[in-house]
Image: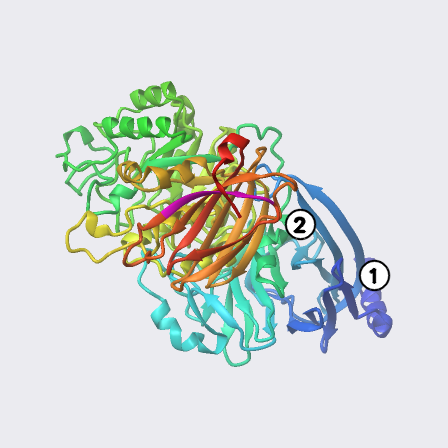
Amino acid sequence: MIFKLKKIHLNVFLLICLAPFLIQAQEINSPNKNLVLKFELKENGVPSYQLSYKGKSVIKPSTLGLEIKDAPSFMDGFLITNTEQKSVDESWSPVMGEEKTIRNNYNELVVTLAQAKNNNRYIRIRFRLFNDGLGFRYEFPKQNDLNYFVIKEERTEFQLAGDHKIFWIPGDYDTNEYAYTTSKISEVPSLMKKATIEINSQWPIKELAVQTPSMMKSNDGLYINIHEAALINYPAMYLELDATTYKMRSHLAPDAVGNKGYMQTDAQSPWRTIVVSDKATDILASKLILNLNEPTSYKDISWIKPVKYIGIWWEYFVAGKSTWAFGKENNVKLTDDFTKLTPNGKHGATTQRAKEYIDFASANGFDAILIEGWNIGWEDWINNWKEDVFDYVTAYPDFDVKAVHEYAASKGVKIIMHHETSGSATNYERRLDRAFQFMNDNGYDAVKTGYVGKIIPRGEHHDGQWMVNHYINVAKRAADYKIMIDSHEAVRPTGLNRTFPNWIAQESARGTEFESMGGLNPDHTTILPFTRLMGGPMDFTPGIFQTDLSYYRTGSKQRVNTTLVKQLAYYVTMYSPLQMAADIPGNYERFPDAFQFIKDVAVDWDNSYILEAEPGDYITIARKAKGKEAWFVGGITDENTRTAIIPFDYLPKGKNFIATIYADAKDANWNEKPQSYTVTKVVVTSKTILKQFLAPGGGVAISITEGKDSEMKGLKKI
């Protein structure tokens, strides 16, 4: 014991004596030299970093650290005891994605920081500087004086260089389903109350805070996006905001007793990410967040496939056409005999209705159909904080699981299971294996999970550490049964679709369903790719052709705030390997020429080209279909009309191609003539540049294929 004490005292003595000679500052550049990261220790051994882009300040000196409960903090008293640098330049291929091959090129700095005052307890901060931004995380190696600890709060700062324009939603522990507000940072406090609209299962943060991904534009033309990557065994991060000094600081989701995270070494935080460029198109093209996630460990990925689907879903939102629930009574339990419920006469998920959707899917080349409301339990759970609501294996009396499966299989169509948990994650976890086995037994290989409502365990939040681990556990367990996951109302994604590729999509934002509940602003989907979609694919559920909802309910002023063509463009601008044609089949039959684009468009890609973009205003993207000589273009605008500039220089040179252009008609408008459109075929080459009119709240969609000379005869060449 005496020897150990002497050794510790000697180490402390040496660190103190050598401190003036230790390197206290480090600097690295991005591979292309545009970005410069500087790390140093400030007075009292406080870690600090700063970031610049082409000489412009992105993050001014900002402190790093964490507060620990009932233990000394990781905030100060540090000495740099070691630094390591390396460069990486490699490529990898995602299971599904926007690119067939992704380059992972960065320069890394790892700084080891020891606290002499705390028995040389040490941590590491790992920085990776890419050409498109910075990722860094805290690492907690296993050591005698650091085994288990509880995080009180993470204190990572992002000191911004000015009063940037920011596209934001309120910080909330339980939902990301707010509408976006665009303002200056200094204006956020005065707008927060208006922005915090009422949503099911919300828990706004008391401090002035915004969600990530947080998208900003500086007065000197820099686009800056702050988010996180690889959120595992840790709570989600929000950004507390000082609107006078333009400082952001991390704020973690708490658990039921107010703690932020429980850590067992070896451990690490998620990566904190800052994507930056002087071009908005570079933000959308960035793969930094994906690159910071670990490769999948799945040995077999052959069963993970992209899906284009329809479903018994949208009809629940329009005019009460049908309902999830079978019966009228609401005083029911899982143990009750649901065959004795009084039918409400509007149940949507019937065997007959399912067969009609299957027929439509089969006739039009769709992979699958989603059926919501097939299982018992819907009568009594909204706004009831109940533990046992669904069992995930018992169907309503008018839905024959076996018959529907057999009919779908005979038509070459898959069925997507729906598991609404009502927020009761404990109930879902208890029943998970039985539910997944039921899916295997009945031919289901994908499931849409839902988490509407307050979370059980009671007091936990959708974005807390417990639930973060729950979502991952569901994805991993589903992989054991070769099941793909589409999660709704979950924590927003952080690139984990690389590590868990069967977690193919999420909602986690304000999607199409809100078009029936107040509507989405025309600029909403020009913001989402810069915010929510930075973390991963979104199940946005586009494709609504009947945008005026008075079609269903006389006198209704509710509408989908887009033109019909803008709905087509979403299949390109809103990336997901899981894409729904969300409207009622009869509406597609009324517009067969427009519906053709949805039938043709790919959902998995070899290459993507961000042609033009400005957050909140417009986006135009071209993509090449995976393994095919076919290209698709989607362009959208906000409430303003504009002319999209669409080059075709990504096409093979020296060849002619047929471009089918789905365009807003000159009299189209999202709120007056949304269904006014034209379909035109022209011949294009790699030298073509198209100037295309987009109506207010409108868009353009283009499919491009190689054509025979006979097919191009008589077509205009542009």
Q: Which residue is mark 1?
A: 7
Residue 683 drawn in magenta: yes
Q: Which mark is residue 266?
A: 2
Q: Residues within 10 Å of mark 2 (few under 14, many from 20)?
A: few
Instruction: Measuring from the top left, give residue 336's x and y in whole percent.
Output: 20, 33
* Residue 485, placed above or below residue 687: above
Q: Which mark is residue 632?
A: none
- Which residue is located at x 42 percent, y 53 percent? 699
> Disc 2 residue type?
Asp
* Residue 191, placed above or below residue 343: below
Task: Report if residue 120 is visible in the image.
Answer: no
Relative to 558, is 187 on the left or the right?
right
Residue 327, by quadrant, is top left
Q: Along the line of sight, which residue is nearer the eye, 634 or 661?
A: 661
Instruction: Measuring from the top left, give residue 692's x and y in whole percent.
Output: 47, 55
Which mark is first along the chain, 2 or 1? 1
Q: Which residues are magenta?
A: 678-685
Q: Along the line of sight, which residue is nearer the eye, 187 or 81?
A: 187
Q: Main secondary structure of the magenta part?
A: strand
User: Element at badge 1?
Assistant: helix
Instruction: Measuring from the top left, give residue 93's x and y in whole percent.
Output: 65, 39
- Which residue is located at x 43 percent, y 45 percent? 539
Q: Are marks 1 and 2 in contact (CB under 8 Å)?
A: no
